[in-house]
Image: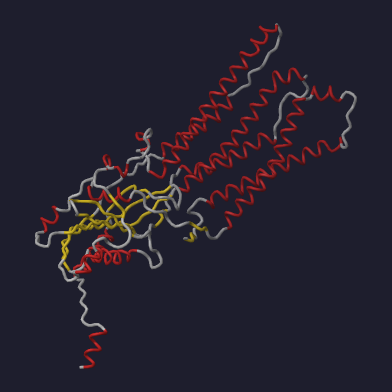
Amino acid sequence: MVIERNIWKNGRFLLGIVYILSGLTIAIMGFSQLKVLFFEFAPYFPFSVPSDGVERFLNSLPFVFATFVSLVSSVAGCLFGIQWFFTGLTDCTKKFKTVEDPGNLADKDLVISSLLSAREFNSNPLFQPKFSLNNFSLRWFTPATHGVIKFLVRSVFKLLLVIFAIVVIARLFTVAPLLVNRRFGSQFALTVPDLQGLWTIIGVLVAVNFLIIVSFVSTKKRSLDFETRDLLVRGKGTIVFFLAILEELLSLVNSRNLSGNGTSRFEYKVQDDLFAVVDLFESHPKRNFGPANRIVYLLIVSIPLCLIWGFQKLIHFQFPATNVDHYMFFSHYFPAMLVEIISACFLLFMASYFGKLTDKIFQISRFDSYLMVCRCLPANPNEISMDDQIDNLGYQPQDKWCEVHGPENNLLEWMKRPEKLTKFSARIMWTRIATESSFPSGIRKVTSFDQDASLQSFMDEILNVLKSLNFEIEATSETASQLKEQ
């Protein structure tokens, strides 16, 4: 686990401020309205029902209904406001935030294939989204944003269904009285409420979804740049020793207590009984805390506005008409009051939706790390030409990959004749990679390969060290004791 000390980086501090301000404002609004209602009805305590109480109740339905909505909303505002206040206060007072270690690198075989074949992005399977129906659209977005994009698209479709349902219900309000009157010969009528405010809120929500989708389109050109060096290695050791020394040298790019995700080793068949061995080494990924998407800050500002506006409409719910009969109330005023309540609930839904979306966007994590790949191929000891060896390094994208664990298969055979001269070709590739995941500890997918000057100088030093390696055992404890006896 990694202790992340800067609480600004993951957005929780900003959301905490939002919840503190919103919760405090809504709780004060709810408490103030409860005081107003209490002093307004206090003179009538204890309630006594007069003889014409039922008739008065039926003639004051708009007032009774508006008071009931205001009372329930005020109580809810106090409770939710207090909860949000303390939730935000908890987030703001945290000095340390525990962040899980970065996840493993995804599609390691495709990463190696991309470096060995040097395919362009358009034809490289590593950068093609694995969705059969969404290939055309999702290829414009980075892999970590695919989940957010699908979440936004699903939300847009749900809003379209809501729009369709509202249109159908509004149409029924127009047609139903005509059908009832024609069937029963009555004079029943319904007033279709004004839906302009509701259409505006839904339209803004749909527009924000499309704006976020467009903002996720990747504008940065993804590159496939890397450095490579071909070596011809000869000695009395096997390939596994060379790779082990190389791994130890490459681990110097990490801090002392950061081991990264280790080394992955693969084999693929080149010819009959001839396998290439490939080591993939990645330095410990360093998280890049640049903003996942700048529009997220617009969403953070919208959350308190929607919360306060929605609760304000419910807590101070009023209606102009106060004394009308129950028939007039249900046929003319009640639909409009329902639309007003639904509009306020949509504002609260927008605030909750923006909060969930903000958290998803802040969870998107970008990492930078160094990637080194070494591919070794046994060579014929009689061949000494570098060109002949490089020709044997050919790679076909259809080659079958197999991840291997444990000791090398030929190590036991080598131990029988350790003095035998061995020879192999090695191709070392290195690059700086940018990876993304949908949450900090999620599987990371590569977004680009870039050259790095500091990595280039580091690899030059490693190659110089490899050239000068030479181990010889001059004496053992057994030979030393024999010399003493002599």
Is residue 10 shown left or right of residue 431?
A: right
Residue in the image at 81% along x and 25% along y: 57
Furthest residue toward right: 51
Residue in the image at 36% along x and 41% along y: 218
Image quarter where the C terminus lies is: bottom left
- Is residue 373 placed above or below 51 in the rendered structure? below
Is residue 65 shown left or right of residue 193?
A: right
Q: What is the basis of the colouring in this image?
A: secondary structure
In percent of width and height, residue 7 lies at: 51, 56
- Is residue 445 placed above or below 198 in the rendered structure? below
Q: Nearer the viewer, residue 383 or 111?
A: 383
Q: Which of 150 and 238 is in front in this view?
A: 238
- Is residue 85 placed above or below 168 in the rendered structure? below
In percent of width and height, residue 432 lies at: 30, 55
Residue in the image at 44% along x and 44% along y: 294
In percent of width and height, residue 462 lies at: 24, 66
